[in-house]
Image (tube, helix red, strand yellow):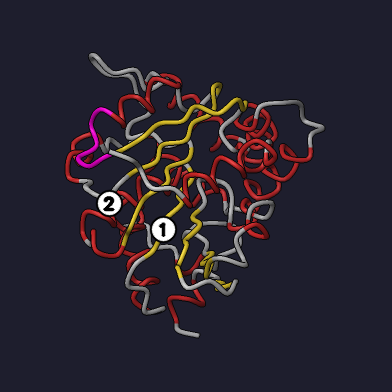
């Protein structure tokens, strides 16, 4: 195992001849895909990895400069693909990883046959003629709460993000992986994500994109999926799922798994 694979806890599973990458979002790790992975193993070589800063990674490997932009994470992804000698893949990115995959695909479009974006947003802040869902004041309060008492913040944020009560298994699971992050790293990562603005790069994304979105998501308003569809540089398709929350693959796998499989198996008909 190479140093990049080891640092990102890379796992390669399954027996198919096509590579499929599963990439997680903020506050989770590769375990967020646990309900989905068994459905892929007969048909795909599935690559799982953890983003730097996830609680499962060595915090010493987190580079506060490199990982202060999504480009840093995109270069991590490209390094993983290079180390594994992957020449083409289907990329499934949840939340921030959808944008990380988009950045990587601009640099190396040849490596990605399609991007499947789950709960993706190019910008979380509202702007003139753009509704991202948050005002700067909302984000400042979020960052302050994280700094003041990280565990209390995790316990409050998890049910909001997942949708549902604190008793649900999905909320408990997200609370666990969120709390696994080192608080100072979690704060930096959340700032990088929530203050990012990737709108200007969308036109340069030329690989086909499948945009999957919950009908109700506290982090990403439904209209953001339509914004992505209108502004991406290549062909794209949107599906709004009858799910609640930002982590539907964890909270509503029975609904999400068939949708994901459909978009993985079927290309966009122009």
Q: Quadrant of the C terminus?
A: top left
Place residue 216 in its image quadrant: top right
Q: Which residue is mark 1?
A: 90
Q: Which residue is mark 2?
A: 103
Q: Give the x, y percent position of residue 36.
A: 64, 52
Of all residues shown, which one is farthest toward the bottom? 1
Place residue 78 in its image quadrant: bottom left
Q: Nearer the viewer, residue 205 or 182?
A: 205
Q: Which residues are magenta?
A: 230-235
Q: Give the x, y percent position of residue 218.
A: 54, 24
- On whether residue 72 falls in the magenta region, the answer is no
Q: Give the x, y percent position of residue 231.
A: 23, 31
The CA span between labels 2 and 1 is 15 Å
Badges 2 and 1: C-beta atoms under 8 Å apart? Answer: no
Q: Give the x, y percent position of residue 166.
A: 77, 30
Place residue 57 in its image quadrant: bottom right
Work out whether 248 lies above or below 263.
above
Q: Secondary structure at mark 1?
A: strand
The reply, left or right, for residue 117 in relation to residue 49 is left
Of all residues shown, which one is farthest toward the front? 269
Q: Earlier in the sequence, mark 2 or mark 1?
A: 1
The reply, left or right, for residue 175 in relation to residue 107 is right
- Residue 19's label in the rendered image is none
């Amino acid at each position: 195992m190479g140093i990049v694979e080891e640092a990102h806890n890379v796992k390669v599973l399954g027996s198919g001849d096509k590579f499929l990458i599963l990439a997680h979002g903020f506050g989770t790790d590769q375990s967020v895909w646990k309900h989905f992975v068994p459905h892929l193993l007969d048909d795909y070589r599935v690559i799982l990895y953890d983003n730097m800063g996830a609680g499962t990674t060595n915090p010493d490997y987190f580079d506060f400069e490199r990982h202060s932009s999504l480009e840093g994470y995109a270069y991590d992804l490209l390094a993983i693909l290079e180390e594994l000698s992957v020449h083409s893949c289907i990329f499934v990115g949840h939340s921030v990883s959808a944008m990380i995959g988009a950045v990587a695909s601009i640099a190396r479009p040849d490596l990605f046959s399609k991007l499947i974006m789950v709960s993706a947003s190019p910008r979380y802040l509202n702007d003139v003629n753009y509704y991202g869902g948050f005002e700067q004041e909302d984000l400042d309060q979020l960052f302050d709460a994280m700094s003041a008492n990280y565990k209390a913040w995790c316990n409050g944020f998890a049910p909001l993000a997942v949708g549902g009560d604190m008793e649900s298994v999905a909320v408990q699971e997200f609370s666990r992986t969120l709390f696994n992050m080192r608080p100072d790293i979690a704060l930096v990562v959340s700032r990088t994500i929530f203050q990012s603005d990737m709108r200007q790069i969308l036109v340069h994304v030329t690989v086909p994109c499948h945009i999957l979105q919950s009908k109700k998501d506290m982090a990403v308003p439904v209209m953001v999926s339509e914004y992505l569809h209108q502004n991406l540089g290549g062909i794209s398709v949107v599906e709004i799922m009858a799910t609640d929350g930002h982590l539907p693959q964890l909270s509503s796998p029975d609904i999400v798994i068939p949708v994901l499989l459909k978009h993985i198996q079927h290309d966009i008909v122009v």
